[in-house]
Image (tube, coloured by chain):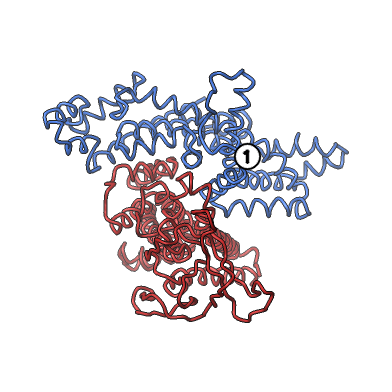
Amino acid sequence: MRYLLRRLLHAVFLLLGVSLLTFLFSALAPGNYFDEMRLNPQISPETVAALRAQYQLDRPLPVRYAHWLNALAHGQMGFSFAYNSPVAPLLWARARNTLLLTVTATLLAWLLALPLGVWSAARLGRAPDRVISWTTATLLVIPDLVLALGLLIIAVRTGWFPTGGLTSVGFDDMSPLHKLRDLAWHMTLPVTALVLAALPTLVRHVRASVAEVLEAPFLRAALGHGLPHSKLLYGYALRAAANPLISLFGFSVGTLLSGSLLVEVIMSWPGLGPFLLEAILARDLYVVIGGVLLSMIFLVAGNLFADVLLYWADPRIRTAASAK
Amino acid sequence: MKQRRKLMIWLVILGALHGIIAAAGFFAPYDPVEQDRERPYLPPMHIHIVDAQGHFHLRPFFYPLRLREGSFDQYEEDTNTTVPLRFFERGAAYRLLGFVPSRLHFFGVAGARVYLLGSDAYGRDELSRILYGGQISLLAGLLGAGVTLFLGALIGMAAGYYGGWQDELLMRIAELFLALPWLYLLFALRAFLPLAVSPLEAFLLVVVVIGMVGWARPARLVRGVVLSVKERDFVRAARGFGASDFYLLRRHILPETASVLLTQAAILVPQFVLAEMTLSFLGLGVPEPMSSWGNLLATLQQYNVLVSYWWMYLPALAIVPFFLGYLSLASALQERAGAYKIEEKGNWNPS
């Protein structure tokens, strides 16, 4: 338990550090949201000053940080200048779309990567392993920007998939089944891009850790005892190889909010990505800080989740932790 | 031996790729900002060696493109006239590697314009723009990696050598930077820097932003090396003879980190080229009329370009051979470093 508590404390400090860092960066920033307003002759300097005061931009940085932390403790993340509304609900609405995309993609990627990796490891050096290795190596040298744009071009030229958005026009009038189909149709392209981008790393890790375990004497013994191959691979080998994979899974969970940013922008998926980009271009300070912090919370939570899983799955960690 | 050969092969390939980009002026037939408003979005021209009558030509040639009748953006080949391709043709003035003024181009045609990879909205030659854009993107990647490795080596050495609370503080900050997703970090850093700047400033800004993102990993690796090296006998002996901290770090410790830094460089450069591409693609990087692989791709954000002009996607493919080269180089370097480590322990001799 001490082990988990220490991890939790560590996570909290990390988040505080990130928020402080983003605030410091924002203080170094030349210009702010109201600069453009100041150039507008129809808005008097007093109005701009009043607005700045209203959003507390005229206060010194430590005061603003303390104020913001206090608001955060009450579940708020400041105010968006551009939307003139609290940041938290705005972010949440977009984060939901992002999660819809990334949870699907992550699950798919892992469901594909596990059997592919195990299969590849079981036939190390033979034809299936070669094919899988070459495919992952090819995918690895295609950056996600290139991949996503390529998929988009294919979609546009064939007309098989929509080129953006979450739903079709007239979505509200559809029957539930149609709604689901429409959504899946819109998700196909971004999910494919995300899965293809994540797959090579996952497959390679699964392959490496399973291949290592397959060398172990206990598995040779089990094979000698005549256990069926599939049970051997998925029941014993995968379980023994799970340790690094759990950490990797934690990382997958952690990047749920941040990993799809670019793909969302390219495929015009109304998630956090385009929203944040827009906020950056408009200098909508608290939205940027909120977005960064939200994705960080996910990252830290993912790592924490992996730690808990490891603690639960690996007796060595439990004994090491209680021995301390 | 085999590792050494692999390393050399990839180094040669990468050298050739960089050479082509560095000598963009020579390989590009035109100036990258030269416009031809008569020919927007011209599709890539085909090289022929057999003409419409079935005659074979030793010298490759083109058919000029003309608008298809009754259309405003569909082109067809005009098979009445052939335009022979000439090698080592004189054309637009440029400076080779930024110094040597020259007019010599690898290829060109007389009296017409040839678009091997098509043209963009202003009739600018896409091939020339890709080659010149590569200079910006690669330079951003290389300089960014330089900044990162410098910062990483400095911080890593300081943390590893001095230890104590300095080490503790620096490594906590490094952890923070490692935890942040790099694209977010890039965004956040860029968000708080000025948006409307001149192209040169924008380029330097991109380099600085990219350079500041990645220092944490090399710093940690360097720190690890320093921690083990500073207890080695030759360092202790030098210290015993009264060597100063600076001398020790420069003369005995820095050379030991070279292998780690080299491997990191091979990993970081392609990542940073991609970072430049991403920033410029999103409109946060190098602006027009300067071309970079990222801002060349930015036109794809317009729907009509995406639908009709597929050759605007070609700049994306330019980075793939570089990625392949650098990743292979990194893995070859890692293998070599691994082999050395085992060799040093003395229980197994490779090759």
* Quadrant of the image containing the C terminus of chain B: bottom right
Where residue B321 sits in the image (x, y, percent)? 55, 62
Nearest the camera: B259 or A171? Answer: A171
Question: Does residue A243 appear left or right of residue B317 in this picture?
Answer: right
Residue at the disc numbered 1: A160
Question: Where is residue B85, by image quadrant?
Answer: bottom right
Please report the residue visible at 63 percent of the width from the left and 39 percent of the height from the top.
A160
Q: Does A79 sit above or below residue B152? A: above
The red-coloured chain is labelled B
Mark 1 residue type: Trp
The blue-coloured chain is labelled A
Asked if one can make out residue A14 in the rendered structure from this viewpoint, the answer is no
Mark 1 burial class by Cα count in 10 Å: few <14, some 14-19, many 20+: few
Question: Does residue B331 appear left or right of residue A214 in this picture?
Answer: left
Asked if one can make out residue A81 in the rendered structure from this viewpoint, the answer is yes
Where residue B338 sits in the image (x, y, percent)? 58, 60
Q: Does B9 sit above or below residue B320? A: below
The chain letter under disc 1 is A
Please report the residue visible at 36 percent of the width from the left and 60 percent of the height from the top.
B290
Nearest the camera: B13 or A34? Answer: A34
Seen as rendered, the residue at the extreme right is A226
